[in-house]
Image (spheres, grey):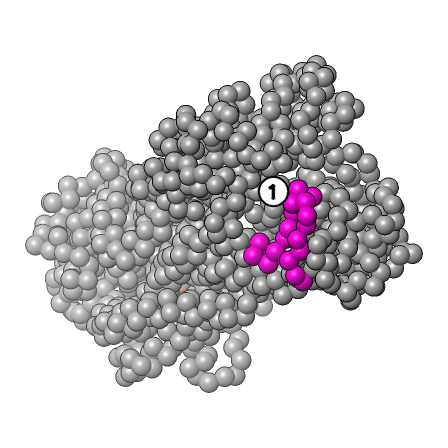
Amino acid sequence: MKNPLRKRFKRDLKSNKGRYFAILLMMTVTIAIMSGFLAVADGAQKVLNENRADCKLEDGSFTAVKKISTAAQAETEKLGVSVYENDYVNEKLPDEATLRIYQDREQINLVTVIDGKSPVNKNEIAVDRLFAESYGLEVGESLTINEVPMIITGLISVPDYSALFKNNSDLMMDSFHFGVGIVSAGVLQSFPANEIVMDYSYYFDNRDLTEKEKRNLSTDIKDKLVDNGAILTSFVTAENNQSISFIDDDMGSDVPMMKVFLSLIILIMAFVFSIVITSTIETEAPIIGTLLASGYTKYELIRHYITMPIAVTLVSAMIGNIIGYTMMPDFFKGMYYGSYSLPPMDIELNMEALLLTTVLPIAMMIGINFVALYRKLSISPLNFLRKELKKSKNRRAVKLPNVSFFNRFRLRVIIQNKKSYITLFVGIFLASFILMFGLVITPMISHYVDSIKQSAVSDYQYILKGPVEPENPGNAEKMTFSALETYYSPAGKNIEVSFFGLREDSDYFDDLPISDDEKGGYLSDGLAKKLGAKPGDTLDFVNPYTDKEYSIKVIGITDYPGALTVFMSQKQLNELLDRDSSYFNGYFSDQELTFTDKNSLATVITPEDMSKFGDQMLSSFKQMAPLCLFAAIVIYLVLMVVLTKLVIDKNALSISFLKVFGYETSEIRKIYLKATTLVVLGSLLLCLPLVNLGIQGCFLIVQMKLSGYLPVYIPMYLYAEIVAIGMASYFVINFIHMRRINKIQLSAALKNRE
Amino acid sequence: MEKKNEINTAFFSVKNIEKSYGTGSAKVKVLDGVSTELYEGEICVILGPSGSGKSTFLNVAGGLESIDGGSITIDGQDISKMDPKSLGRYRRDKLGFVFQFYNLIPNLTVKENIEVCAYLSKNPLEIDELLHTLGLWEHKDKFPNQLSGGQQQRCAIGRALVKNPALLLCDELTGALDYKTAKEILALIEKINQTYHNTIIIVTHNEPIKNMAHRVLKLHDGRIVKDYVNETQLSAKDLEW
Ligand SMILES: Nc1ncnc2c1ncn2[C@@H]1O[C@H](COP(=O)(O)OP(=O)(O)OP(=O)(O)O)[C@@H](O)[C@H]1O
Ligand SMILES: [Mg+2]
């Protein structure tokens, strides 16, 4: 005979359909997101790895001032590496965009054609798929390159640009203003010779090297090249190349973050269920007492009460996984393909995801509810019969302050339901956090870009290949620039730091007390924060091209948003770099400078550069805000509906008594709903400082991925917005509760025989 | 279950049971040296003023509450020495409880409520037959809130009986019922006793009920002040109060 108690399930489902639907909805959405996301992340990882292997992704690359000698190449290759010439030109396109054009690759970094075909003729070009989408190019369109029209024959991806970073030191990839193109053999030679960048890729013969061996071999390669007369302008291993490794770092932290987040939601739902069950047990106490007295064992009852959470979880897991594999992948693919240049991927059934979305939720449900039930059911049958559910013998009513009757009543309600309210608080915190995360990104980036623009010391910064005078010096000021690296332990790698050598009485940095006699430098606050450095510390830097090491004392910290920079006396910097005291290689200027030899210019930084950066950041986060808003509102609504309804359910009898005594509905609402309203409002307010802390912590992780420093900026109005959205959600629920209270019958009190 | 008919040995016997609540100066002795014996198939009525320890006695007899001293032997087994687990098994196999509050499961029908306890027994009574005996046949598919108090109490009795317990313990089983309904319930108990020969202990405030019992106990301040055997019993329908 099957246990007749199981007949209760269907009826319980029916009479509490709102509650179970809400829980089911939330778990299903969570599981769908988790399984969809993990399947896509896994698919992306797989396609990335396969593509890297199939297309022979380089192990590193370097650029040289001129073509390296065959002897140098031959000597280098003896180290167990193949070196391939991989020259390119940077072609300016309208709207501040740059297309980096390579010759079709045959031996290294092979091209994957996603749409159309490879260029064959002189006037044909294939462009990166992501850039084409962001910039607005299509196959068949014409593009003016090197002053001649070229037809776009195909959309491609290349393994050495999975993230479209123009410069390795860029804070963010920028698919709107930077892309890669491929032309057929010979076309590159038609560009002016001085525009062709001598770029080389190298590929280790031994494919089984450890990370450390790879690093060492790369260092050997660099040394060998320099020893053989090559003049390198850059040398970067695949590991340190943001265009290659950024996606690894990004996915590396996305996946665990998502897992933690979603598991947290399931955990909360398990708590919600345990609260629902314990409150059911409280209302059914005499029944349980009778069943226990009649000989039902604790375990039979545990099994009875734990069946519903397990069933709901199972159903959520099933529906969630189906949705996760059918509807979610497109969304998440959109997120990856909107940020990264990847070849097309297939979604496969992911065992780990399956475990995380079925076994884990069920295990959590069983674990938490078993413990709750076990504790709840370990009191004696007699205590159940007497409704004495508290363990402690001397249960006394909590002494309440001498406040008005209504307030005292409300306080009792809050104390009676403290577990519901605590869980509600945790849920409100989580939802507010998600909401804040979604809302804060746009203002934070705008603020960052604004502050950089505002505090820009000059409109233009010119970095030159050597000391050259402009045709129109005006108020331009000479400076020495050098890019050195320092070890950034949280990310376990070197980051690039810009060194500016300034005049003692610099017009552009009049706040900075630079002295030619003082060794050491001033750190931009971003760099100081990122490295956790204070004045008086000594920092170690290395020149990645020469391996020369430098120790710099921190004199002070200066407000220079965004950039990772050290400012020091030009004299000191020149000395440090073994240059003449009169050496310079750059200008700060408020007007555009013109140089006779265009080739002498290495980089120009203009105000537009910052706007570009802002655009890209905003675009890659733009799906986040509505997603977070949606998720947060679902969490608010579901938790509020389930947990605050319990308060009314538990007190249905008292409410009905109050009605019999002659209380008006509005007065009853004042007691039972106002208490909840106060708790919700209180929770929303109380969790704001915690949300702030959480966001700070979260951006600490984001920070590690960025080759810059993004200060956390949370405008005050966002706090108000969160409270407003939270309260708005609550008032929807409150409205339902008001109707519920109206519906409670007087007869409930009259029928009761206790 | 096969009924043993060893008339000479008591089916239910308590010896010198002691039970106190609280500690120190707040210590109250609720049962103070209570001893008595019941034979199989007997109905015993326990009377006494409020607070005299009647419910406590019943709870102790049913193993719901431990005792401080003495022994309780039911069907040859000393339940005061059992661990909670065997006590649970014991209750499952041998005991039926009826409480003043019916404690029916609201979202199960009358029949299902009874089935819940039938599940506990290896050879429960035939449920349909029991429903007829209880006079609940027409109501078997109703939910508890669609029943009158008397009907609910009958359902609760049915639930306790369906296991065909050797010992049925009833606390204030007519306390909340009107005269007519109370008499119907008592008649039902009588009928059940005659049909199934269960030993039944009834706790009540209602003096006249003693006339249907084989044995009557009167408690006062935790002591037995009267313990006698009725030579003849009135039928439940002839009780008057
Ligand atoms: N859990 C307990 N803790 C402390 N004292 C208790 C407890 N249960 C009962 N008592 C006390 O034990 C005494 C006997 O209680 P009991 O419930 O057995 O009385 P009763 O005879 O059934 O009374 P009534 O006819 O009113 O039901 C009472 O004085 C009561 O206050
Ligand atoms: Mg009593």
Residue A354 part of the magenta segment: no
Q: Is A590 rendered above or below residue A140?
A: below
Q: Which residue is at the front of the view, B175 or A308? A: A308
Quadrant of image for the C terminus of chain B? bottom left
Q: Which residue is at the front of the view, B228 or A446? A: A446
The residue at label 1 has a CB less than 8 Å from ligand 1:
no
Q: Where on the picture, by quarter, is residue A60?
A: top right
Q: Which residue is at the front of the view, A352 or B99? A: A352
Identity of the amino acid at label 1?
Asn
Q: Is A365 rendered above or below residue A72?
A: below
List x then y, in percent, for residue B92. 32, 42
Q: Which region is colored magenta?
A: A590-610
List x then y, in percent, for residue A636. 40, 61
Q: Is A492 rendered above or below residue A439?
A: above
* Disc 1: CA contacts within 10 A as few (<14), some (14-19) or many (>=20): few
Asked whether residue A650 appears in the rendered view, the answer is no
Residue drawn at 87 percent across, 59 percent down: A515
Q: Is A652 rendered above or below residue A609?
A: below
List x then y, in percent, for residue B159. 23, 50
Residue drawn at 63 percent across, 18 percent down: A82
- Left or right: B206 as drawn, with respect to A630: left
Residue A605 part of the magenta segment: yes
Residue drawn at 49 percent across, 24 percent down: A185
Residue drawn at 35 percent across, 71 percent down: A731
What chain is tagged by disc 1?
A: A
Most extreme residue toward the right is: A517
Quadrant of image for the N terminus of chain B? top left
- Left or right: A454 as drawn, with respect to A421: right
Identify the residue under disc 1. A167
List x then y, in percent, for residue A76. 71, 19
